[in-house]
Image (cartoon, rainbow, N blue to C red):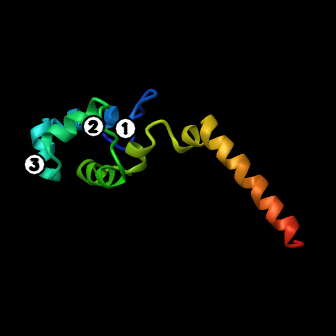
Amino acid sequence: MKDMLSIKFPKSESGDIVRAFRKMAGLTQADLAEVTGIAESHISAIESGRVKIGIDRALVFAAAFGIDPDRILFPNGVDQVLATPKLQKIRKAAESKIKMRARASGE
């Protein structure tokens, strides 16, 4: 089996990462379901992108593959997630509110 910790993926979704690690480990969806307790149909839905993975399941998959959950939760890196326009807008609004509150309290 390849060293799963050093593998780099092109821009991917969490389900793509789960599928890739599962296949690299030589496991079927049924095998992964058996060891994780997550229904095979749910694993299929996650891998195909029909269902979001969620933190709890990402932790379970990460434990099964022996990898950091960030590899599954943020397959393109946390910086890519934080750079999305929606999160940038939220950050700017929060910074503005923080500054406004600081001025109002005399800091």
Label 2 secondary element: helix
Residue 55 percent coordinates (x, y)? 36, 53
Label 1 secondary element: helix
Q: Residue at x 14, y 53 (%)?
A: 37
Q: Which kind of residue does numbered mark 3 sit on?
A: Glu
Q: Earlier in the sequence, mark 1 or mark 3?
A: 1
Quadrant location of residue 13?
A: top left
Instruction: Determine which of the numbered discs, if any, sits on residue 34 in the image.
Output: 3
Instruction: Determine which of the numbered discs, if any, sits on residue 14 in the image.
Output: 1
Using a 10 Å C-alpha cutoff, classify the residue at mark 1 as few (fewer than 14 neighbours), some (14 to 19) or many (20 or more): many
Residue 38 percent coordinates (x, y)? 17, 49
Q: Earlier in the sequence, mark 2 or mark 3?
A: 3
Residue 40 percent coordinates (x, y)? 13, 40
Using a 10 Å C-alpha cutoff, classify the residue at mark 2 as few (fewer than 14 neighbours), some (14 to 19) or many (20 or more): many
Using a 10 Å C-alpha cutoff, classify the residue at mark 3 as few (fewer than 14 neighbours), some (14 to 19) or many (20 or more): few
Q: Residue at x 83, y 67 (%)?
A: 102
What separation in Å lies between label 1 and label 3 (alpha carbons)? 20 Å
Label 3 secondary element: helix
Q: Which kind of residue does numbered mark 1 sit on?
A: Ser
How many numbered discs, if any? 3
Residue 70 lies left or right of residue 67; in this view the side is: right
Of circles 2 and 3, which is in front?
Answer: 2
State the residue in front, 20 or 30: 30
Q: Residue at x 30, y 37 (%)?
A: 51
Q: Earlier in the sequence, mark 2 or mark 1?
A: 1
Q: Which kind of residue does numbered mark 2 sit on?
A: Ile
